[in-house]
Amino acid sequence: MIKKKKLVLYFSVYGTSKIIAEMIAKKTGADLVEIKPVKPYDSNREHYDALAAYAKQEHDKNLRPEILNEIDIDKYETIFIGYPMWWYTMPMIMYTFFDSYDLFGKTIVPFNAHMGSGDGGTYKTIRELEPNATILEGLPLEMSDIENHKIESHISEWLKKIS
Ligand SMILES: Cc1cc2nc3c(=O)[nH]c(=O)nc-3n(C[C@H](O)[C@H](O)[C@H](O)COP(=O)(O)O)c2cc1C
């Protein structure tokens, strides 16, 4: 069940996870916070190959890219957490987040943007990383559906289901 004090936390480079995050925040009245990297990623889609190669290195080396902003999670009971699929898992900066913050007793609601991988098993990974949190059913959304404004009803139905 979604409890009262809500935060939507997201990481996004091309802006689609951000669109989902903003919609969830608007519909639920949650606060909205972006996970910002110390070293920004190239959001120019014409440079996709370079970003893909860079992200693959981070993944293969199991790196933990630094987060720039301090995120105040203490006052929240429910935290929606969103990210894009990168190399069949979460971007490594999400692992930085799960490593650095104590989510004991929190209710976590994952969501993600993707281009075919769905959640890629990441909701299960989050359950494994955070055994002391309650993880609700997540919502994977396809990039083109997000950009073609086809997601609002999906988000509404999902929110209704998990409320
Ligand atoms: C480095 C990189 C790796 C990606 N790997 C996957 C993947 O494994 N599976 C998938 O479905 N989509 C993959 N994608 C597509 C993104 O998940 C998709 O473009 C998403 O909408 C981007 O989210 P954002 O706009 O919030 O950054 C990848 C994109 C990038 C840039």
Image: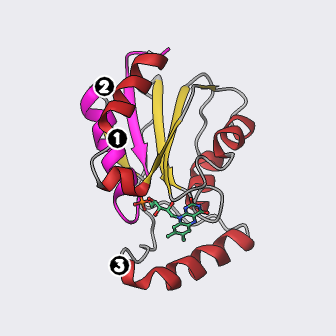
Q: Which residue is mark 1?
A: 151
Going by the numbered disc 2, the residue's amino acid type is: Thr
The amino acid type, in three-letter code, at marker 1 is Ile
Residues drawn in magenta: 1-29
Query: Which type of secondary structure does the marked residue at label 3 adopt?
Result: loop
Residue 50 drawn at (x, y percent): 51, 85
Quadrant placement of the C terminus: top left
**Based on the displayed image, in which of its 4 quarters is residue 155 positioned?**
top left
Q: Where is residue 70 drawn, in percent x and y?
A: 43, 50
Q: Is residue 31 visible?
A: no
Confirm whether the magenta stretch covers residue 15. Answer: yes
Task: List x then y, in percent, for residue 5.
Answer: 37, 21
Residue found at x 60% / y 46%:
119
69 relative to 62, above or below: above
Which kind of residue does numbered mark 3 sit on? Asn
Q: Which residue is mark 2?
A: 28
Between discs 3 and 2, the one toward the N terminus: 2
Say whether marks 3 and 1 touch (CB < 8 Å): no
Label 2: few (<14), some or many (≥20) within 10 Å? some
Residue bearing the label numbered 3: 44
Note whether 147 is above or below 77 in the view shown: below
Give x and y (percent) for residue 118: 58, 48
Taking 14 as reference, is 141 left or right?
A: right
Question: Under tag 2, what secondary structure?
Answer: helix
Q: Residue at image x 39%, y 37%? A: 8
- Give the CA separation, mark 3 to mark 2: 31 Å
Nearer-N-terminus badge (1/2):
2
